Amino acid sequence: MFYHVKELQFNARVSRPDPRFANLLLEQFGGENGELAAAMQYFTQAFGAKMPHPDKYDMLMDIATEEFSHLEIVGATIQMLLKGVNGELKNAADTSEIMQVMNGKAAKEDIIHQAVFANPQFGVITGGGVTPRNSQGIPWCASYIHSNGDLTVDLRSNLASESRAKLVYEHLMKFTDDPYIHETLSFLMTREVAHYKMFEAALLDIQPNFPPGVLAADPRYTQQAYNLSEGSVRGPWNEGEMPGLGKEWIYVENPLQQVKETEGQANTSENFTKELKATEKLNKDMSDLKSNEVKSAEPDGLSQWSTYPAATEA
C-alpha cells in the first residue's frame, strides 16, 4: 500500500524560470537513467526477491519508493522552471518575467525557440507539462528496465544504474547557475551514492554471489587473457592473480597460434579432468542450493503475499 505525503523529501526551489533547463531536466524524469526508470527497475526486481530474500525485497521496495519521491522532486522542479510557459511566455510584453531569464541577452523569440522547439514534444503535445519523456521528447520505455530474475545480477545492474544516474546529475549541474537547483541536484546525486552503497552491501551479503546464476565457469577457459591487439597493455586484468579467485591469469601472447595448435580449443595439453569433475559437483550443489532456497521460502497450501496483524481493541 502506498500513501502519498504531499511534502517533498527535499524542499525543491528555483530562483527564476528557465524552460531550457527544464527541458534538460526531463532526462531525469523520463530518460533511461532517470528516476522513473530506477523506481520501476527496483520495484520490478523486488517481486522475485520476496520469497528467497525477504530482507532484500524490503530494501528494494524501500529504495523504489524513494526513487518515486525523487521523481516527484524532479517533476516539481521542472514545473517551477516552466513558470510563464503557458502565461507570460505567450505575452508579448518585454517586461514579462520570462523575458528576464536571459537578462536582456536574447529576444523572446530565441527563448521560445530554444526552450520549446528544441523539443517540439515538450511544447506542442504536452504544452509545457511534465510527462515521462526525455529531453528529446522520446517517451519513457520499459526496455530501460533490467530485471533478470537472479538477485546478484539485478544488484550488479543497480550498481551501474546508480553510477549512470549520478553522472547525469553531475552533468546537469553544469547547465544551470541557480544555487537552489544546485542544492536539489546535489541532494539527488548524493542519494544515488547512498543507494549504490546499499546495493553493494546487499550483494556482499549474498553468498555465494559469483559467478552469477547457477552454473560454475568452465575451468578450461576461465584464466586466459588474450592479446588481441598490437601493443596490448599489461595490467591486473591480464597478469598476476585474478581478483578474488586465487588463480593466476594466463596471458596468451599469440591467440591465433593457440587456436591452431589446440584446434579451436578442442585439444589442450593440460588435463582438466579433476577440475571438470569438481565443476560438475559444484553445478549440482549450486542447483540444489538455489532451488531449495526458493522452495523452502514458499509456504505450503494457500499462498498469501502479506500477513495482517489482528487489529488491537481500542
Image (cartoon, rainbow, N blue to C red):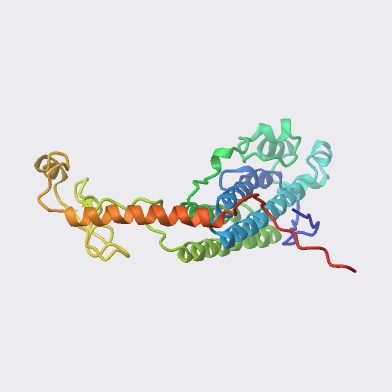
User: Residue 169: x and y, percent?
Assistant: 58, 55
The percent coordinates of residue 122 (x first, y second) are 69, 36
Q: How many marks?
A: 0
**Residue nearest the viewer, comparing 177 with 2:** 2
Residue visible at 81% across and 47% down? Answer: 97
Query: Quadrant location of residue 27?
Result: top right
**23 up-or-down from 312: above or below:** above
Q: Is residue 144 left or right of residue 255?
A: right
Residue 293 percent across, percent down from the top left: 48, 57
Of the 4 image quadrants, the one containing the C terminus is bottom right
Residue at image point 21% right, 51% down: 220
Residue 152 seen: no
> Going 74% across and 34% down the picture, which residue do you hit?
126
Q: Residue at x 50, y 66 (%)?
A: 201
Question: Can see residue 197?
Answer: yes
Asked whether 81 or 242 is in front, the reply is 242
Residue sitting farthest toward the front: 301
Q: Quadrant of residue 178?
A: bottom right
Horizontally, residue 263 falls left or right of residue 110, namely: left
Q: Is residue 224 left or right of residue 291?
A: left
Q: Position of residue 106 (x, y in %)?
A: 69, 42
Which is nearer the eye, 248 or 13? 248
